[in-house]
Amino acid sequence: MMTLLLLLCFISYSGSSTKPVSGIKGGIVTLSCESEDREIVDFSLISRSKHIPVCEKKNCSGRVCKEGSCDVIIKDLIYSDAGKYFLYVYYNNDQREVERQIRKYHLHIHDEISVKKGEDLKLDVVLINADKVERNSRSGWTEVWRRGHGVSSDRLIISDQTLIIHDFTVTDTGTYRVLDSNNEALITVTVTESVLDSKGNLNDTEKDKTDDTEHRNHWMLLVLLVSAAVVIYRRRYRDYLKEKH
């Protein structure tokens, strides 16, 4: 009966718009509740119909923490954090009635990775809320994988939640994006070819390029020094001739 009375006293308010929020993998984002001037009674965070525990201690060691009256901080972002969030904020209005405010967010994760030529490109992006993966090419966005349709090439496989591209080549570089069923971006990954070996050193190709560049720079410096010396000699010679005459 008490629960029923509480439900009856709730005056619900839901914002119609969804606030886009972006973060870098491993970084931090803030879901702002924008209710600092209200007397907050309670709040809860929901994602994919699941309650997300929020640490409310001052020195919180968890990834999801409260800041201020009801802002939520998500730290050490991972791919699976991407998607929609609903923040339910309960507060007392001027008539001391409990109102409910719903804030909606869409979290978009960005990342950058480098892969060596010939190795496998592994993207842990086939999330439960992912509908398709696309790659940006010269002809625009091309589909790499779609739920219910599979992958677009024999070089691609799906293992658990990982999209794997075998034998990585320079043509596989570019921007990959993961979209949900509403065509909203969940994850964007920029993939480049790694120029470092397993020890963190430049590979042979990049070494040759670097050596050639340094060689050209040395010759250019030598030419500049010789040119400067010639100019100085000519000026001094002209000054000598003027003084002589």
Image (tube, rainbow, N blue to C red):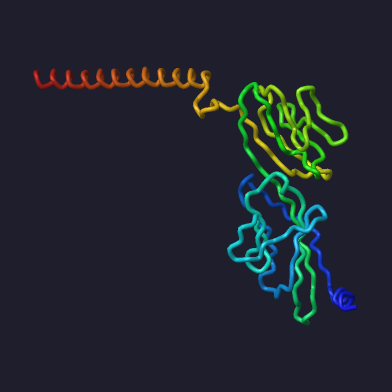
Q: How many marks?
A: 0
Residue 90 percent coordinates (x, y): 76, 71
From the viewer's perspective, tell me whether residue 148 is left or right of residue 125: right
Residue 234 percent coordinates (x, y): 22, 18
Residue 66 percent coordinates (x, y): 66, 63
From the viewer's perspective, tell me whether residue 4 is left or right of residue 174: right
Picture quarter with the C terminus:
top left
Q: Residue at x 69, y 40 (%)?
A: 188
Residue 230 percent coordinates (x, y): 25, 18
Picture quarter with the N terminus:
bottom right
Q: Residue at x 81, y 26 (%)?
A: 152
Q: Is residue 22 above or below residue 100?
A: above
* Residue 11 in which image quadrant: bottom right
Q: Residue at x 71, y 31 (%)?
A: 136
* Residue 100 in which image quadrant: bottom right
Q: Identify the residue at the far bottom of this view.
A: 95
Q: Residue at x 66, y 22 (%)?
A: 169
From the viewer's perspective, tell me whether residue 240 is left or right of residue 63: left
Q: Is residue 112 above or below residue 197?
A: below
Q: Is residue 151 above or below residue 38?
A: above
Q: Identify the residue at the far left of this view.
A: 244
Q: Is residue 153 above or below residue 22?
A: above
From the viewer's perspective, tell me whether residue 150 is left or right of residue 110: right
In depth, the one of 130 and 212 nearer the eye is 130
